């Protein structure tokens, strides 16, 4: 958690050559607000384009760069791969943790789009614990149907 205004990041009296913004979008956004000249390297941001941290993944522009999980793109590929592996499947289950809303929302949106394009029903299961996850998965696989 950032406990001081963003400009305090660079006003401690000693020169800063690079800022490592770790821990998601908030530290990266604070660093971007603090400077447009010092290089900023962010870590583990789901999508740095959506909040305006960078212009695009292939050409970030400005003074920010870093690592993105590309979860949205990977989810679309995973749904497509499942369809390729089991073309007779009519329904896919997607298990998400609603407490991790940034990831869940992105994954859900992408999976719904990919499943719709493949004309596959997407059944969304939400669970916050391993025990609930197992119960939901067992119940959802009881009546598995395939296309003929």
Image (cartoon, rainbow, N blue to C red):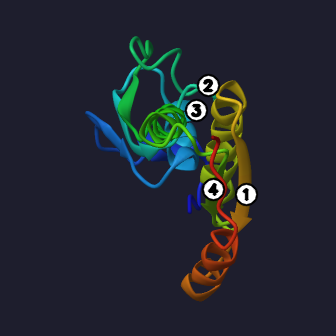
Q: Which of the two marks, 4 or 2, is nearer to us in this view?
A: 4
Nearer to me, 106 or 9: 106
Q: Which mark is residue 33?
A: 3
Whichever of callouts 1 and 2 sits on the residue coming sooner in the sequence is: 2
**Quadrant of the drawing holding the C terminus:** top right
Q: Is residue 43 above or below residue 136?
A: above
Q: Is residue 92 above or below residue 40?
A: below
In the figure, residue 7 lies in which quadrant? Answer: top right
Question: For the residues marked 3 and 1, what is the alpha-carbon distance in whole angstroms?
Answer: 37 Å
Please tell me whether mark 4 sits on a helix, a strand or a loop.
strand
Question: For the residues marked 3 and 2, what is the alpha-carbon distance in whole angstroms?
Answer: 12 Å
Tag 1 near tag 4, CB within 8 Å:
yes
Residue under label 1: 124
Residue 98 visible in rendering: no
> Badge 4 local density, few (<14 within 10 Å), some, or many (20+)?
some
Q: How many marks?
A: 4
Question: For the residues marked 4 and 2, what is the alpha-carbon distance in whole angstroms?
Answer: 28 Å
Residue shown at 53% from the left, 39% from the top = 79
Whichever of callouts 4 and 3 sits on the residue coming sooner in the sequence is: 3
Q: Which mark is residue 141?
A: none
Q: Position of residue 89 (x, y in %)?
A: 59, 45
> Badge 3 local density, few (<14 within 10 Å), some, or many (20+)?
some
Q: Which of the two marks, 3 or 1, is nearer to us in this view?
A: 1
Please tell me whether mark 3 sits on a helix, a strand or a loop.
helix
Question: For the residues marked 1 and 2, what is the alpha-carbon distance in whole angstroms?
Answer: 29 Å
Residue under label 4: 94
Whichever of callouts 3 and 1 sits on the residue coming sooner in the sequence is: 3
Question: For the residues marked 1 and 4, what is the alpha-carbon distance in whole angstroms?
Answer: 5 Å
Residue 68 visible in rendering: yes
Tag 4 near tag 3, CB within 8 Å:
no
Nearer to me, 3 or 12: 3
């Amino acid at each position: 958690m950032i406990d001081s205004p963003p400009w305090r990041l660079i006003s401690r009296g000693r020169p800063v050559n690079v800022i490592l913004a770790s821990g998601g979008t908030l530290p990266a956004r604070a660093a971007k607000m603090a400077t447009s000249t010092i290089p900023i390297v962010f870590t583990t941001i789901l999508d740095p384009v959506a909040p305006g941290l960078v212009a695009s993944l292939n050409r970030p522009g400005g003074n920010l760069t870093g690592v993105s999980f590309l979860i949205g793109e990977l989810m679309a590929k995973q749904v497509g791969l499942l369809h390729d592996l089991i073309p007779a499947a009519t329904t896919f289950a997607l298990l998400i943790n609603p407490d991790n809303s940034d990831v869940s929302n992105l994954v859900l949106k992408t999976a719904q789009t990919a499943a719709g394009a493949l004309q596959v029903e997407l059944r969304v299961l939400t669970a916050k614990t391993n025990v609930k996850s197992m119960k939901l998965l067992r119940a959802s696989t009881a009546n598995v149907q395939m296309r003929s």
